[in-house]
Image (tube, rainbow, N blue to C red):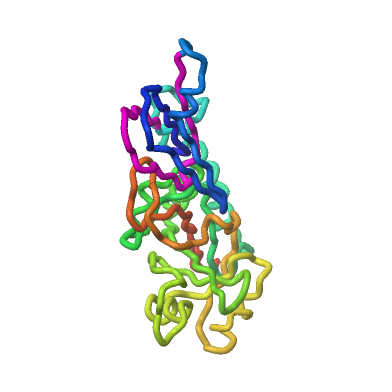
Amino acid sequence: MFGSLVVIYPPAHKGGELIFRHGGHEWKVDANSLTASQPSGSPSLAYVAFYSDIEHEVLKFISGNRVTVTYNLYLVDPTSKPEAPATTPSFKGVLNLQTTLQGMLKSPEFMPDGGILGFGLVHLYPVTFRTKLHETTNYLKGADAHVYQACRQLRLRPSLQVIYDDQESGEGIGIMLDTIVQDQNYDYQDSSYEQTLLDEFGGVPVNKIESVALERSIWIAEWGKEGEFITWVSPFDRHNRLGNIATVYCGNEPSTECIYCSPCLIVRIAAAVDRV
């Protein structure tokens, strides 16, 4: 699913306007005014389409009859059969990636001492404080599902992680966790947000881009924490950053403490001498 289409029928009503927010901007759609402004005798419908990670809200309904129909929009491989499920990963896509990874793993020159591969996911997924990331693998879509399935076929044990911004260490450094926790705007009393992630939640300092030296992290240089360097196969981007969790609309229903984010897929690679 990549978006939604809402169709608003013409019966007169007051209230129920749609509000959309994204990237610091806000739009208001008053469907009743749009249909009422059309020429008399010319039946019309109002409609609006939007991506699934757009925050949207319906304002208070006051009077009249507000009739809407909402469609969930899915991406479908044009070469697939009509009856094929839209969320089923392409076997060819999985096989191609699996073959490539297998060839790399057989080479003693590829990560000879082992290491970590990171995949920044393409799609956004709704999470809350109660989300268990390992269960989210059941809902991976498209290219994300391809990567996960290819790694599983090679028994690489991929795991989903979130990387939180590390304000103490500056741009390019993050703190990796397998847990959804509260953000830095919450009160952590005697310790900083970053220190709480490290000490109480078992977070690990990591690089968000390969060009950043992990030793830049204050937690490694001054506090003696152990970090992990990630070789990014697909880039970590802004979608992976976990921001404030509040009440928003996830899909077509309101959900408390929900936010769209994209976890990272992390794969730990053994040393060449230990790979079969």
Q: x%, y% of residue 159?
A: 42, 60
Relative depth, front residue between 209 and 159: 209
Q: x%, y% of residue 14?
A: 37, 33
Q: Is residue 189 above or below residue 33?
A: below
Q: Is residue 71 above or below residue 206?
A: above
Q: x%, y% of residue 188?
A: 40, 80
Q: Quadrant of the N terminus?
A: top left
Magenta highlight range: 43-71
Magenta stretch: helix, strand or loop mostly: strand
The answer to whether 17 appears left or right of 166 in the picture is left
Counting every numbered tag in the picture gives 0
Q: Is residue 21 above or below residue 86?
A: below
Q: Is residue 68 magenta?
A: yes
- Residue at the farthest top position: 41
**Can you see residue 191?**
yes
Q: x%, y% of residue 142?
A: 48, 41
**Can you see residue 106?**
no
Residue at x 58% of width, y 72% of height: 173
Relative depth, front residue between 119 and 164: 164
Residue at x 42% of width, y 27% of height: 7
Residue at x 53% of width, y 47% of height: 26
Relative depth, front residue between 110 and 29: 29
Q: Is residue 231 above or below residue 54?
A: below
Q: Is residue 60 magenta?
A: yes
User: Which quadrant would residue 145 be assigned to in this image?
Assistant: top left
- Residue at the farthest right position: 211
